Image: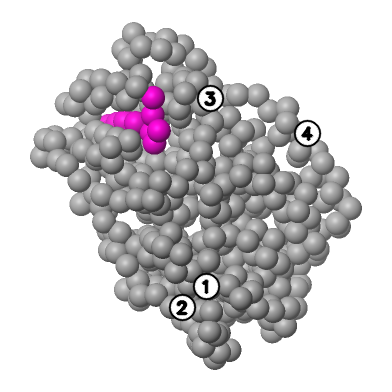
Amino acid sequence: MKRSGIVFFPAFDWSLGDTHPEREERLLYTQEQLFEEGVMELPQVKQYSPGLASLHEVLRTQALFPHPDKHDLAAHLIAAGCAIVLGDAWAHNEIQNGFALVRPPGHHSGATVLGNRGFCTINNEAILINHLRTKYGIKKIAVVDTDVHHGDGTQDIFFHDPNVLFISLHQDGRTLYPGSGFTHEKGGPNAWDTTLNIPLPPGTGDEGIHYVLENWVLPRVRDFKPDLIINSAGQDNHFTDPLAAMNVTARGYGKITELIRPDLAVLEGGYSIETALPYVNLAIFLALAGEDYHQVIEPQKPQRQLLNFQELKRYIKELKINNKQANPHWTTREEKSLPGGKWAFIPHSVYYDTDGIQEIRQDRVRMCEHCGGTVLIESQNAYAGEKFALIRIPFNACKECRQAGEDLWGAFIGRKTSVLFQDQVHDSIQLWNVQEGVRNF
């Protein structure tokens, strides 16, 4: 019998509109279902109270431009804080696994944040991961994102981190927001092949997604040998979800959880508020708690056409070939304006659909055989003209990369609207902006 933690945060005072799919009712039906089914009375279940993430914990992972005060973070900080509460409980061996049933979601929020996109402002799982690395010295983490949308924000944050394996199963980006998540996106030059994207065709159901997990995802996770597995537990692959076109059932989600065996799961998307979420969440948590989930049956029956399983197997075989043959997509050069060594250059563009902001980025990472490499991101709000920079010294940085980061921080002060310096080695966060000068967080 597993000890399983759970925390609820419906965010009653945060929504994107009374009829918007991202509103507080998303979790109210789930809470009622779990209590009515007696799940909260199981002896192995422990409910935790919500927590609050600090700005320091956010800025350790993400740059909020032009300034953290310009973002409405109240609900988002609690959602991230709930994930941290369960992370601490797991690290202290109070629980063997846990499920943070929280909103707002976070996996579309990346390394730089100019606004809300895909209903996300800050990234709950990424903040949790770096909290656990900083506080408890966790070395290797695997993230398996089962949301129907590509977890592009989580990928962006850890794209240059060789100690974080990010895997995303999602509906093909050619058919769905955010239009990314293809097999050639495999990580940066110091973290090549620690990102795995598996874009699935519309209509993929239980059998198909379980096949992909068993024959591709789980072997990759086992090879990586993580100390911690996190599931970004999006539930919009369900056959009733209004924003996507997949065919997964509640019992199918229970099996997904049973296969992945995550240490921690954090809710992401899922917008069939009455006909899917209460049943999917119930099946997921029963699977986490080691209970039988096979009797969880939603009231509706699938109406969408199910993709032929043999066709899916052929499609996955081709995806594997494309993934294996993918080539790096960056240019490498020595730049006189940057500290010594070769730097990889990766142009990047981000559209914030909720707030209507276009971000243009120039990403650079120092090529290094010893660590993840110093990261420099120059960012610009294409409409407002504001310019920003993020400088990151990564966890376990070598001496040369630490020095490169410190040199960049000294050089970039005064050159942008805002500059954030993330020294993850010393857990030191500094922000310079034109109004305040330098501020420590």
Q: Position of residue 16 (x, y in %)?
A: 39, 66
Q: Badge 3: few (under 14), some or many (20 or more) residues near its Cα, within 10 Å?
A: many
Which residue occupies the foreground of this view, 118 or 333? 333
- At 53% from the left edge and 49% from the top edge, which residue is drawn? 227
Give the secondary structure at mark 4: helix
State how far apart marks 4 and 2 are (Cα): 44 Å
Q: Badge 2: few (under 14), some or many (20 or more) residues near its Cα, within 10 Å?
A: some
State how far apart marks 3 and 4 are (Cα): 20 Å
Give the secondary structure at mark 3: loop
Among numbered discs 4 and 2, the one appearing first in the sequence = 2
Identify residue for label 3. Answer: 189
Q: Position of residue 280 (x, y in %)?
A: 62, 73
Identify residue for label 2. Answer: 46
The amino acid pointed to by label 1 is: Ser
The amino acid pointed to by label 4 is: Ile
Among numbered discs 1 and 2, the one appearing first in the sequence = 1
